[in-house]
Amino acid sequence: MEKRIINPWQWQNERSYVQAVEVKQAAGTLYCSGQAAVHADGQSSTDDMKTQLILAIQNLEQVISEAGYECKCIVRLNVLTTSSAEFFTCFNVLQDWIAKHGIKQATTLFEVKTLFETLKVELEATVVK
């Protein structure tokens, strides 16, 4: 796989994303459904935003890993949250995870009225290899 990052500016670097990612000669593409703070037994978390974000990240990692892909190959990551204000109080959790894996992804943040049951944040990813 060949991946090229397009960043006409520098300001997005502090926000842990890129403006565009071009992928050529990919061996596969994995489209992940939104992963949220749902426990292995199917129970939706009722915890705070930070705790839910950590579990959503863990669930996304598990899906990616079980499919035979790597987090560093995420090229698109959409974040859906019921409160962008609350989400940004723990944004560093997502930024640290992105840095840990060396992810360079296009990202869009959506504030939505509601997510399933008691969920506050959901991560939707596209991964290539």
Image (cartoon, rainbow, N blue to C red):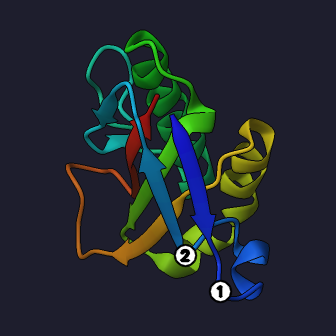
- Tag 2 residue: 19
Q: Where is 48 relative to 2, above or below?
A: below
Comparing 42 with 95, the one in front is 95
Element at label 2: loop
Comparing 26 with 38, the one in front is 26
Residue plotted at (72% across, 37% down): 101
Horizontally, residue 114 falls left or right of residue 6, namely left
- Mark 2 belongs to which amino acid? Gln
> Label 1 crowding class (10 Å Cα cut-off): few <14, some 14-19, many 20+?
few
Which of labels 1 and 2 is toward the front?
1
- The image quarter containing residue 95 is bottom right
- The image quarter containing residue 14 is bottom right
Q: Where is 59 relative to 56, above or below?
A: above
Give the residue furthest to the front. 25
Comparing 69 with 60, the one in front is 69
Q: How many marks?
A: 2
- Mark 1 belongs to which amino acid? Pro
Disc 1 to disc 2: CB gap under 8 Å:
yes
Residue plotted at (36% across, 75% down): 110
Q: For marks 1 and 2, give the CA distance.
A: 8 Å
Element at label 1: loop
Residue plotted at (78% across, 48% down): 99
> Label 2 crowding class (10 Å Cα cut-off): few <14, some 14-19, many 20+?
some
- Tag 1 residue: 8
Q: Where is 76 relative to 72, above or below?
A: below
Sooner in the amino-acid sequence: mark 1 or mark 2: 1
Horizontally, residue 103 falls left or right of residue 125, namely right
Q: Position of residue 109 (x, y in %)?
A: 43, 73
Horizontally, residue 113 falls left or right of residue 126, namely left
The disc label shown at residue 63, or none: none
Residue plotted at (52% across, 27% down): 61
